[in-house]
Image (cartoon, coloured by chain):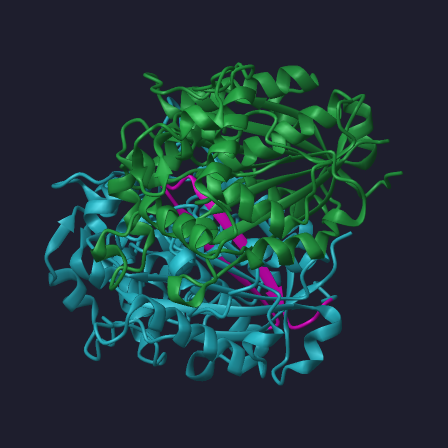
């Protein structure tokens, strides 16, 4: 089923999604690293390569990621790297790195503390500094425009958004890592809520929280040695769309579709998908771009709408899929991560069990 | 297994203040220059890897999002690396990994900084006003190097003059100080004792780019390839009791890993030239020792004897180095691509004659992040 060059997730860990975590980000990371190593029966010295994703701007300090190394451990010196992206992209690089064949085990991390930050005030700085950033074009407003475009194109209704939110909140009620959930949520009650960023309501927008997550990945035989049920990474692909809203069809996600085609996501049944849905309507766009039908369970964890630990949210999606494959409740699934406003950049990670 | 990867295209902007171009324009100039050098177009690129120092330097969060159009990355993967000052070299290494993994055939990698649109010393002080800046961090460690090695004080001035003289041969260099001299350096204002103004790097704008490709595609490009024979990275904590800040263990182990990978046993003899990350003059002898090119205490002697000059036996920073151009996020990549220029024979007026094997290097943070690569004119060189 899997060859000696195949790479698998052999351990996964995440902190709860804290509304406000009063300790430091390195502490969050250390929790995750310790859990991962303990779970796999490994020592820090067994890890060949470490790579982390985080965002200086969330901490409000240039070089904030340097302190994060304190949570990982770097004495004796370690072979490591860092991406200023969600931890899902750190996984992408680690997965490629192991394919060089000279090392066997990589530790992948994502972390962030959103609580010190007003995301709507800070994240307009993702825009280009000459036109969009000075306009204060924030990601929630951008999402509202995208949701409105869907409605006006006749591709979705506000009831559809409420359906996504209700289903997520019900699922989130049973997720111990979620910050919010509501076992009794229904679309009709949610539709009674006031607008937050029309046509989106507050429950349509993910709560930005504090958290960290990580996975251990290993190559072929080493993966089997270390883990009874390795979750094989069948492929990771990511693609970006134009930065200019006027050049995009906001009702679609061609970058997701392209990545899905490259990975042949629908070439076999997809049991579970965890999607980086930070605004309800995004699930509708992503399902269509991925070609998923009702046979696929989407966001059984509740997804980011029940807790959005920025910079590990995407990696957590992959973990939620991997966990279900590892425990046998799913055999093939896709984890999705997104970056930028209105699904500008999208990553897919296709996972399978040994069958 | 890893497949061979080569540099087939190199692009650089000029590294002076570039108030006439946007960030998009800056990176695009370097990208197009590299593509042109490789005789390729954006259509030939499978993935883009970008790097820069902290987002706070220009105030743009995750700039891959706004630069993807300018870099022809729409519809493709674009990946963003950030490892402090070492980021330029780390980005080159990440790009090489994409090719070596066998998943991407041709990768464009671009790094940049536009210091004229921000305040680097503020950011380098952790976002605090009135901070010590990079020079304030490194000066006490340089003092400690001088104490340990008993190096005479003119060594720093010598490096500063040598690198600025080399820069006069490099049209891209930020600083072209025609009348550079020991006296001029010595008499420039003292910034952080023992570092004078002219022993410090400038604040530059600029972007650097490379096209990397797999072995079976190198023949599409007109210049000889620079084969990436090996790369290594090491990191250690920024501070702990007993840390050797003068010769950090991570730097030593990074060099050891790199030399082992390439089969280097005698770096000074087997490597023809090096581009070392020297933002402050004294880091030349410090890295010669810290990366096992000179024995401990002997690095300054190589500088003093002229071994690191363009016509020496181990030329260092023939392009003028970080001391002559410092677009921070790009500076590490410039070291890597200038090493490639040397072994391709495309280094122009600062070409080291007969260079076949060259070292590119960068460090960052509190001298705690190291990233290095070795490139060669030959895929399987005879190291002798």
Nearer to the camera, B308 or A140: A140
Q: Quadrant of residue A301?
A: top right
- Position of A170 with respect to B265 (left or right) is left
Which hue is chain B drawn in? cyan
Q: Quadrant of residue A216?
A: top right
Is residue B30 found inside the magenta-colored segment of the image? Answer: no
User: Residue A346: x and y, percent?
Assistant: 54, 50
Image height check: is B328 above or below A31? below
Image height check: is B279 above or below B143? below
User: Residue B119: x and y, percent?
Assistant: 19, 53
Nearer to the camera, A70 or A290: A290
Which hue is chain A drawn in? green
Q: Which residues are magenta?
A: B356-379
Q: Does residue B354 appear in the picture of this structure?
A: no
The quadrant of the rendering that contains the N terminus of chain A is top right
Is the stretch drawn in magenta largely helix, strand or loop?
strand
Q: How many labels were placed on the picture?
A: 0
Image height check: is B367 above or below B314? above
């Amino acid at each position: 089923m899997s060859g000696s060059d195949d790479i698998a997730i052999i351990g996964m860990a995440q902190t709860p999604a804290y509304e406000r975590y009063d300790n430091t980000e390195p502490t969050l990371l250390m929790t995750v690293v310790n859990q991962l190593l303990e779970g796999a029966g490994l020592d820090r010295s067994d890890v060949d390569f470490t790579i982390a994703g985080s965002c200086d701007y969330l901490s409000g300090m240039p070089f904030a990621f340097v302190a994060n190394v304190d949570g990982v451990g770097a004495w004796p010196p370690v072979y490591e790297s860092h991406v200023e992206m969600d931890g899902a992209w750190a996984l992408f690089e680690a997965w490629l790195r192991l394919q060089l064949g000279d090392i066997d085990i990589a530790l992948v991390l994502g972390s962030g503390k959103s609580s010190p930050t007003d995301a709507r005030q800070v994240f307009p700085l993702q825009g280009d500094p000459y036109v969009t950033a000075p306009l204060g074009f924030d990601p929630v407003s951008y999402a509202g425009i995208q949701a409105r475009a869907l409605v006006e194109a006749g591709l979705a209704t506000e009831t559809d958004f409420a359906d996504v939110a209700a289903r997520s909140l019900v699922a989130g009620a049973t997720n111990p890592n979620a910050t919010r959930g509501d076992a009794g949520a229904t679309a009709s009650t949610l539709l009674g809520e006031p607008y937050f960023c029309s046509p989106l309501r507050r429950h349509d927008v993910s709560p930005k929280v504090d958290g960290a997550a990580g996975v251990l990945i290993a190559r072929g035989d080493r993966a089997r040695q270390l883990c009874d049920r390795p979750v094989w990474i069948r492929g990771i692909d990511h693609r970006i769309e134009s930065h200019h809203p006027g050049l995009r069809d906001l009702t679609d996600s061609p970058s997701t579709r392209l990545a899905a085609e490259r990975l042949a996501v629908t070439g076999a049944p997809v049991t579970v998908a965890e999607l980086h849905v930070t605004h309800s309507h995004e699930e509708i766009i992503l399902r269509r771009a991925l070609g998923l039908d009702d046979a696929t369970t989407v966001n059984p964890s509740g997804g980011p709408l029940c807790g959005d630990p920025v910079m590990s949210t995407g990696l957590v999606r992959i973990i939620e899929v991997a966990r279900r494959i590892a425990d046998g409740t799913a055999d093939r699934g896709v984890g999705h991560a997104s970056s930028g406003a209105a699904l500008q950049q999208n990553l897919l990670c296709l996972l399978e069990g040994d069958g | 297994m890893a497949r061979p990867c080569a540099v087939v295209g190199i692009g650089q902007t000029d590294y002076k203040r570039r108030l006439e171009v946007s960030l998009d324009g800056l990176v695009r100039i370097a990208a197009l220059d590299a593509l042109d050098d490789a005789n390729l177009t954006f259509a030939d690129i499978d993935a883009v890897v970008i790097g820069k120092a902290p987002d706070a330097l220009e105030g743009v969060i995750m700039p891959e999002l706004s630069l993807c159009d300018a870099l022809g990355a729409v519809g493709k993967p674009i990946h963003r690396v950030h490892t402090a000052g070492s980021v330029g070299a780390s980005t080159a290494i990440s790009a090489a990994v994409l090719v070596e993994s066998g998943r991407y055939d041709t990768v464009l990698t671009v790094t940049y900084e536009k210091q004229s649109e921000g305040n680097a010393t503020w950011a380098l002080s952790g976002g605090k006003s009135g901070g010590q800046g990079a020079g304030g961090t490194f000066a006490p460690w340089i003092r400690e190097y001088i104490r340990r090695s008993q190096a005479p004080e003119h060594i720093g001035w010598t490096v500063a003059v040598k690198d600025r003289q080399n820069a006069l041969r490099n049209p891209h260099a930020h600083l072209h100080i025609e009348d550079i001299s020991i006296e001029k350096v010595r008499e420039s204002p003292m910034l952080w004792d023992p570092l004078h103004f002219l022993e410090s790097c400038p604040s530059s704008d600029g972007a650097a780019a490379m096209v990397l490709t797999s072995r079976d595609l190198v023949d599409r490009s007109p210049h000889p390839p620079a084969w990436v024979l090996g790369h290594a990275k090491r990191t250690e904590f920024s501070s702990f009791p007993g840390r050797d800040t003068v010769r950090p263990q991570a730097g030593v182990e990074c060099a050891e890993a790199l030399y082992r990978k390439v089969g280097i046993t005698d770096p000074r003899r087997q490597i023809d030239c090096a581009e070392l990350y020297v933002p402050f003059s004294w880091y030349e002898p410090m890295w010669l020792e810290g990366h096992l090119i000179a024995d401990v205490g002997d690095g300054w002697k190589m500088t003093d004897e002229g071994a690191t000059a363009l016509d020496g036996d181990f030329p260092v920073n023939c392009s003028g180095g970080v001391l002559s151009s410092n677009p921070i996020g790009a500076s590490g990549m410039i070291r890597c691509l200038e090493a490639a220029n040397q072994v391709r024979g495309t280094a122009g007026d600062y070409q080291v004659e007969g260079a076949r094997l060259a070292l590119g290097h960068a460090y960052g943070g509190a001298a705690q992040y190291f990233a290095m690569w070795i490139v060669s004119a030959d895929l399987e060189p005879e190291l002798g």
